[in-house]
Image (tube, helix red, strand yellow):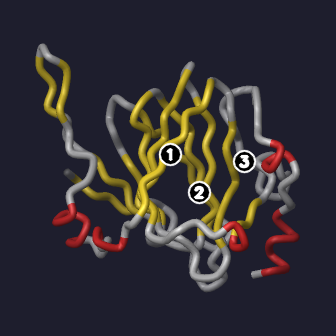
Amino acid sequence: MHVEKAELADVLVFRPEPFRDDRGLFTRTFDARVGEQVGVQAAAFIQDSQSRSMLGVIRGMHGRSGRGEAKLVRCANGAVHDVLVDIRRESPTFGAQQAFMLDDVEFRHLYVPPGFLHGFQALTPTADVCYRIDRPHDPAEDVAVAYDDPDLGIDWPLPVTLVSGRDARAGCWSDLLATL
């Protein structure tokens, strides 16, 4: 398993090396020893979650206030266009965004440190995204920015087919900035 630094400060991309043969494939989706070598404490993760989305669905852009939330994100089935936005005022990449292709072919996954907005769009008929999170969910700490906020200007690759009511009502980037 290889680990690469992303353009956004402190974001890491884990690149497993799937073993493929006539039966299919086998791959490690996480290795605590590799993570700890790059500063990711595997023992800190306390919750695993999974979402399933249909083609064109967008989930995001979500984040957490307070201490934030670290997570590992991967697409176990299908493919997604995954987007991160750095909302850490002290960060050298504050306000910057980066997109990643996560899929069930290369099995890349992201380590997202606390202080990021996160969202994705399903690029396949179904896409299962798995999250490993370092703290319990507290709805009082949820923050969100609209996926189509013009100040973020996220370039989604497909027409949007569906977003949740919550995501449709999400605030704007300038409102979030006023709270940080």
Which residue is depicted at the point 67% across and 58% down? 62
Contact flag, marks 1 and 2 (Cβ < 8 Å): yes
**On the image, numbered disc 2 is attached to which residue?**
84
Q: What residue type is labelled 1?
A: Phe
Query: Residue 149 in the image: x percent, y percent?
Result: 83, 52
Sequence-wise, the earlier of marks 3 and 2 is 2
Q: Is 95 above or below relative to 4?
A: below
Sequence-wise, the earlier of marks 1 and 2 is 2
Which residue is depicted at the point 69% across and 73% down? 141
Query: Residue 118 in the image: x percent, y percent?
Result: 61, 56
Mark 1–mark 3 distance (CA, rounded to whole Å): 12 Å
Q: What residue type is labelled 3?
A: Ile
**On the image, numbered disc 1 is attached to which residue?**
100
**On the image, numbered disc 3 is attached to which residue?**
154
Mark 1–mark 2 distance (CA, rounded to whole Å): 8 Å
Q: Is 61 above or below relative to 116?
A: above
Looking at the rendered structure, the secondary structure element under dot 3 is: loop
